Amino acid sequence: MNTKQELIRISKLLEQKGFTNAFQGNISIIDRNLGKLFITPSGTRKLTLTEEEVAVLDMDGKQLEGTVKKSSEYKMHLAALQYRPDCTAVIHCHSVYLTAFSMLGETVDPKCHEEFLLTRGIPCLPWGKGGTSDIYKGLEEQIKYHDIVLLGNHGALCVGSDLEKAFKVLEAVDNTLRAWVLAMQIGNGKVVDIPIWDELIKQKEKAIHNL
Ligand SMILES: [Zn+2]
C-alpha cells in the first residue's frame, strides 16, 4: 500500500466513525526522505477520497500534486511534525466528544481508566482562528509530551509514529471519553479514580522516556 492509499484508508475509517466529514478535519502523512507531505484536500468528502485528489506538498507548503486545493490547515500539520520528529502522521478531527471538551477550555484529565494513560491528560490550547497559525499557538510546548491536544473551541489534533497508530490512539481515547461522560451522568458526577493512578503515570513516563 502506498502513502496515498494509506491516507485514503484511514480517511474513510475516520469519516465512517464520525470523526471527520467533508468540511471538518484533515489527515496527513509526511515522507521526510522525499520532502513531501500528503494531506487530505479542502472541502472534500473523505469517505470517497481518490488518489488523484490527495494533495502532495513540499516542505514549504507548495502543492505539487492533487486535483483539489490542499487543506487550509497544512501549516498546523507541518508544525506538529516538526515538533515531533518521532512521528510521521497527523490527524486533526472534530470527533464529537473531543470537540465538546475543547469547548470547556481545560485540560481533560480523567484518572478512572487505563486508556487515559495513553495521553496522560489532554491539554487544551486557547482558541485561534482556523486556517491561521493562531489555531496552533502553544502547540510546541504541549505536543512534545502529549500525542493528543485539544484545539480550543474547535476540535483535536493527534500525532503518531504512523497513521494507523495515531488513529488507534484517537479511537481508544474518544471511546473512553464517551464512557466517562456516561459514567459521570449515571453517577451524578461521581466516578471512582484508579487508586494507584500516580504510580501508573510514573511507570508510563518511564516507559516513554526509556528511563
Ligand atoms: Zn478543524
Image: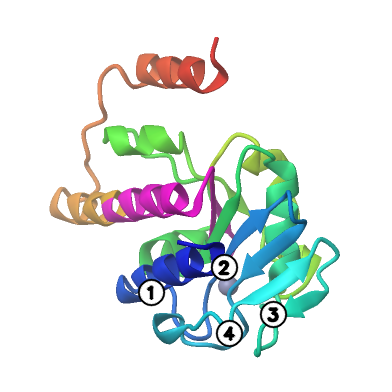
As shown in the figure, which amino acid type bears the numbered disc 3? Answer: Lys
First of labels 2, 4 by sequence position: 4
Q: Is residue 136 visible?
A: no
User: Assess mark 1: CB under 8 A from ligand 1?
Assistant: no
Q: Secondary structure at mark 1?
A: helix
Q: Nearer the viewer, mark 1 or mark 4?
A: 4
Which corner quadrant of the image does residue 10 belong to? Answer: bottom left
The location of residue 5, given as percent across then percent down, is 47, 69
First of labels 2, 3 by sequence position: 3
Q: Residue at x 49, y 83 (%)?
A: 50
As shown in the figure, which amino acid type bears the numbered disc 1? Answer: Lys
- Determine if the magenta segment contains residue 172: yes
As shown in the figure, which amino acid type bears the numbered disc 4? Answer: Glu
Q: Quadrant of the N terminus?
A: bottom left
Position of 138 with respect to 109 (left or right) is right
User: Which residue matches tag 4?
Assistant: 52
Q: Which residues are magenta?
A: 149-175
First of labels 2, 1 by sequence position: 1
Mark 3 Cα-neighbour bin, 10 Å: few <14, some 14–19, many ≥20: many
User: Which residue matches tag 2?
Assistant: 153
First of labels 3, 4 by sequence position: 4
Query: How is this picture coloured?
Result: rainbow
First of labels 1, 4 by sequence position: 1
Q: Secondary structure at mark 2?
A: loop
Give the Cα distance between marks 1 and 3.
18 Å
User: Which residue matches tag 1?
Assistant: 12
